[in-house]
Amino acid sequence: MYKLDFSGQGKKCLQLLDREIGQRIFDKLKWLIENVGSVEHLQLKGKYSGLYKLRVGAYRVIYEIDHERKTITIHNEVDGFVKTIYYYFVDAFLNEQEETKG
């Protein structure tokens, strides 16, 4: 199974989100790592080539995939995007990943 990694100040952004929105994003990220091989990833273009976007309502989660490390990195700040990356329950999600390994 793939694991999530976060760049930037993701945890700080999380605390600014409404709990319901955060839960929706959390659920979508969980779904993404469970289905990474069967999802049609929407690739960004131009200088953002190599990054993908995941739509969660009005929000976009920008991420990259490292198949060798089995890691999906969620990017917090990507120039030119408004409301790009928002994620919630990072600690809970990472703890859940650790528990499933163990």
Image (cartoon, grey):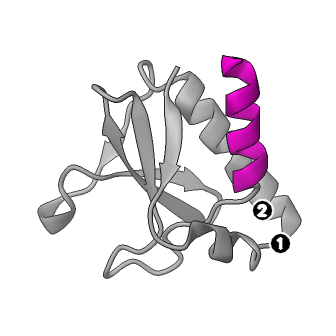
Q: Are marks 2 and 1 in contact (CB under 8 Å)?
A: yes
Quarter of the figure that contains the C terminus: top right
* Magenta stretch holds residue 79: no
Task: Please determine whether, in this image, residue 32 is positioned above or below residue 92.
Answer: above
Does any portion of residue 24 appear in the rendered image? no
Considering the numbered disc 2 on the image, is that residue within a helix, a strand or a loop? helix
Does any portion of residue 95 appear in the rendered image? yes
Residue lying at the far front in this picture: please name it.
102
Residue at x-position 70% and y-position 69%: 14
Image check: 19 left or right of 93?
Answer: right
Numbered mark located on residue 21 in the image: 2
Task: Please determine whether, in this image, residue 83 is positioned above or below residue 20.
Answer: below
Residue at x-position 65% and y-position 68%: 11
Residue 33: image location, x then y, percent: 54, 30
Task: Please determine whether, in this image, residue 20 is positioned above or below residue 34.
Answer: below
**Nearest the camera: 83 or 66?**
66
Task: Please determine whether, in this image, residue 28 is positioned above or below residue 69.
Answer: below
Considering the numbered disc 1 on the image, is that residue within a helix, a strand or a loop? loop
Residue lying at the far left in this picture: please name it.
46
- Callout 1 amino acid: Asp
Residue 34: image location, x then y, percent: 58, 23
Q: Label 1 neighbourhood size at 10 Å, few (<14), some (14-19), many (20+)?
A: few
- Callout 2 amino acid: Ile
Report the predominant secondary structure element of the magenta stretch.
helix
Magenta span: 90-102
How far apart are the two marked residues, 2 and 1, measured between alpha carbons? 5 Å
Residue at x-position 53% and y-position 42%: 4
Q: Which residue is mark 1?
A: 18
